Amino acid sequence: MNRARINIVGCGRVARSLARLWSQAGALEIGDLYSRSLASARATAEFAGAGRVREQLRHMGSAELWLIATPDSALAEAATTLAVDAPLRAGDCVFHCSGACSSELLAAARCRGATTASAHPVLSFAVPESACRAFAGSHVGIEGEPAAAARVEQAFSAIGARCFAIDARHKMLYHAGSVFASNFTVVLLDVALQCYRAAGIEPDTAHALMRPLVEAAIANALRVGPASALSGPAARGDVELVERQRQAVGDWRTDPGLAYEVLTRLAFDLAARARH
Ligand SMILES: NC(=O)c1ccc[n+]([C@@H]2O[C@H](COP(=O)([O-])OP(=O)(O)OC[C@H]3O[C@@H](n4cnc5c(N)ncnc54)[C@H](OP(=O)(O)O)[C@@H]3O)[C@@H](O)[C@H]2O)c1
């Protein structure tokens, strides 16, 4: 059976991981690879063990699928260049992998008769080797024109993704969910370590203090939900302690003080929801 061919524009971490997964699964034929730098396109071909490196976008051949995997800020411009320079055909599917941006950014490709979509893998691709190992079973949020969305879903399902539909109008908020869950959790752990340090606790001891608290908080929130998992002064309704602590943190440093104030409001709100 003939496999569909995919061309890739923008050969970074996501591109090389997906190219390897599709190639190794025999799900897609990896066609032409183009990136801003030749080195990145070559590294992708080497990592995937497939694909032909093209020095110019206008030298790319035809393909049924086109992945634009540039950073989000370059997606619209890359789609415009693609529409002008690449051999796009009516019915070809052009998609990106951004979680925050809508497939509307690819509108330029639609002028050539292509259909557009986006597929956001909810996974870190920071280390492509690890991303490839972890990919099977991960979630991929898909939106776009129905024909393109179905095509993209087929491609991701073939490498073990669990695809689900997202609403293009709410992608910023959808993506913010992951930012809060993942990125800001890391920021909060850093603030916690700084608090311990400012209180004279040695780094090793601070890590040891923090680990069981963090592990239990996350495990409980995932098991019984945030409202039932919340503990601490706000959960106990200890307004006086919270106020003294807000003052102490604010006196120490302004931004952690502001974060404490806002997070405390959210914590009281969560505690109130837990009671209802
Ligand atoms: N990283 C993640 O964990 C992750 C997770 C889910 C979704 N995503 C999404 O996946 C997409 C790609 O992310 P990434 O992490 O793979 O980014 P990345 O590692 O920074 O790779 C982007 C690649 O695009 C190339 N590039 C930049 N501008 C270009 C242009 N105008 N034309 C052609 N190539 C261009 C870059 O340049 P060089 O050729 O100079 O290297 C680089 O190789 C983004 O939409 C992102 O939101 C990322």
Image (tube, rainbow, N blue to C red):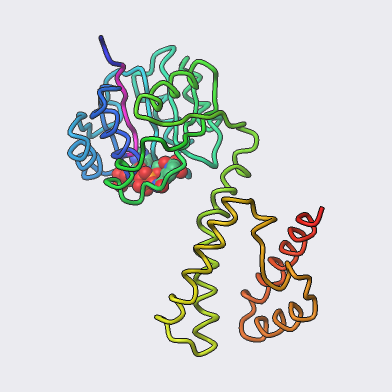
* Position of residue 19 measured from the top left corner of the image (x, y, whole percent): 28, 33
Position of residue 76 relative to residue 40, above or below, is above
Position of residue 216 relative to residue 4, above or below, is below
Which range is magenta? 4-10
Ligand 1's quadrant? top left
Is residue 16 shown to the viewer in this render? yes
In which quadrant of the rendered image does the N terminus lie? top left
How many marks overall? 0
Query: Does residue 159 appear to the left or right of 273 in the view shown?
Result: left
Q: Residue at x 60, y 39 (%)?
A: 171
Among the 4 quarters of the image, the one containing residue 43: top left
Pick the front one: 244 or 222: 222
Is residue 59 shown to the viewer in this render? no
Q: Residue at x 25, y 23 (%)?
A: 26
Q: Residue at x 62, y 31 (%)?
A: 167
Residue furthest to the top in view is: 1
* Position of residue 243 measured from the top left corner of the image (x, y, whole percent): 76, 79
* Position of residue 169 measured from the top left corner of the image (x, y, whole percent): 65, 34
Pick the front one: 108 or 13: 13
